[in-house]
Amino acid sequence: MKIPLPGAKLVKVWDADVQKAREFAATYQVPEVARNPAEMAAGIDGVLLADGRPLFVWAHCDSANWSRARWSVDSRCRSKEAYVNVLRNSVGLRLSLFAMVIAFLTTPFLAKAADLGTVPVGFGRNTTGGKTPCVVTTLEDNSGPGSLRTCAEKGGNWVTFRARGTIDVTQTVMIGSNTTIDGRGKAPVILRGSEQNPVIFRISSASNIIISDLFLTSRHDTPRCVQPKLGKETLGCGVPIVITGKTRNVWIHQSDFNDCGEKCIAIGNQDENGPDGITVSNCLFRNSFYAFLLTASPFRKDVPEMRVTMYGNMFYNNFRRTPRACQMTKLHAFNNLMKYWGPPNAKCAGADRGFAAASAGEAQLVLENNIFEARPGELSCKTGVEIDVFKPQEGFSRGMGKVRHFGNLLLNAAELRESEPEQVFNPGEFYSYTARTADAKLKAHIEKSAGVRGFGGRVF
């Protein structure tokens, strides 16, 4: 079939008549048959409407606008070059009788971060992700066609999933630059690491990467990983995402980290280079010993610029580090919900002393308009932010962590304190953002929206 758009490539087809769509895909070698309009619109630049008359009428538009238009195309749908023809006929019934809705990709109008429904704010604001469609068609962890590994490691791809379910990751996936991994769909995509392979994704000296709408967890076989009592007992138990090296521009969005093992996300450096320009938004971190760590190597006297923004995230039932900034790094956390840290049903003392956020080793931590909800009860842990020095057994020691906090809501006697707030950076000098008031409405919103869209973070 000749497409009346230079450089266009058919990548999906959808029709209410599934058999008709399959026949069309087989005839014209379209790689994917979408199961519904929402799946058809995910990760593409636009659509083509086959009108059903002898002379086809074609239209194309940005997929986000297409979705908002509720399948009635008008002049709001436009490309970067020109407005499309106005087609005001409802296509709902006619699609099932005469027409096909065909997703397409073109060189000038490639997929972009906005197709995920929003764009990142903060230090990772320049992240745009991949463009070329790559569809995961198998749950096997291998390097063959249609595997997650093949799609993610190549670089340049917008990865979506036709195969949905659990992928047991037997060897770390090294994500290539300019990649989007988009797990949206009617059924969940669950990536599971193990004690034999604790790291699911590693981003090392790569750039421009988006991870969205994935469930990430670890399978535990030994008692120390199942119910760790001390931080050292979690070593090797699982870290779903590790970011190192000279990595730039990463956005982790709308994902669910559950029972991670050691920690859920670890960001750090081994040499003079360090990851920078990272945003983590609307994710759910739960049921883990450590949640999030941003740190620099203790063996480097000079620390590279390492900056992270976090917003819209929910931390639930994690023992510590929700999040932790360490060793002269910069972290801005706003409009997050930190709920229930430390041990349940135990006195907050000794090895059972947990806390929510933390700053150590001269790191700069900004806590703005967050909600800190401690566990109820007088004996439960109330420390909303831990502030400490950094004294490793080997390497360079650092002074006290630095914290500035304002506009936060403290529940169940949660406590916050500051440390050298005048030496903490001002996020507004780096980027524009809007922080909502920390109140009951924000709390309800985060509890409802954090995690993988469509599942409420409750599929395990």
Image: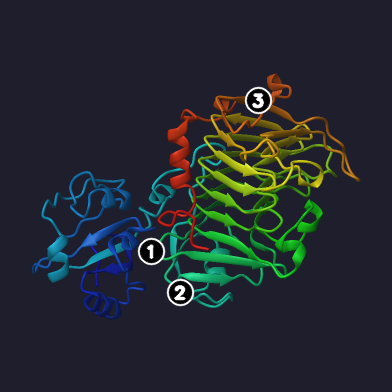
Give the distance between the C-alpha atoms of the residues marked 2 and 3, in whole angstroms: 47 Å
How crowded pointer 3 is (Cα within 10 Å; few <14, some 14-19, many 20+) is rated as: many
Image location of residue 280, percent across then percent down: 56, 45
Q: Residue at x 35, y 72 (%)?
A: 32
Instruction: Name the residue rendered at 69%, 22% in the picture.
Output: 421
Residue of label 1: 186
Q: Position of residue 226 (x, y in %)?
A: 71, 63
Near-viewer residue (38 or 76):
38
* Residue 89 at x, y percent in the picture: 10, 55
C-alpha distance separating marks 3 and 1: 41 Å
Disc 3, SS: strand
Q: Residue 137 shows which numbered tag?
A: 2
Q: CA distance from mark 2 to mark 1?
A: 15 Å
Q: Is residue 17 above or below residue 109?
A: below
Q: Tell me, for residue 93, which label it has, or none.
A: none
- Looking at the rendered structure, the secondary structure element under dot 1 is loop
Disc 3 target residue: 404
Q: On the rendered structure, is 42 left or right of 130?
A: left
Which amino acid, mark 1?
Lys
Res. 82 in view = yes
- Give the residue type at disc 2: Thr
Apparent side of residue 418 relative to residue 368 in the rendered image (left or right): right
Image quarter of the N terminus = bottom left
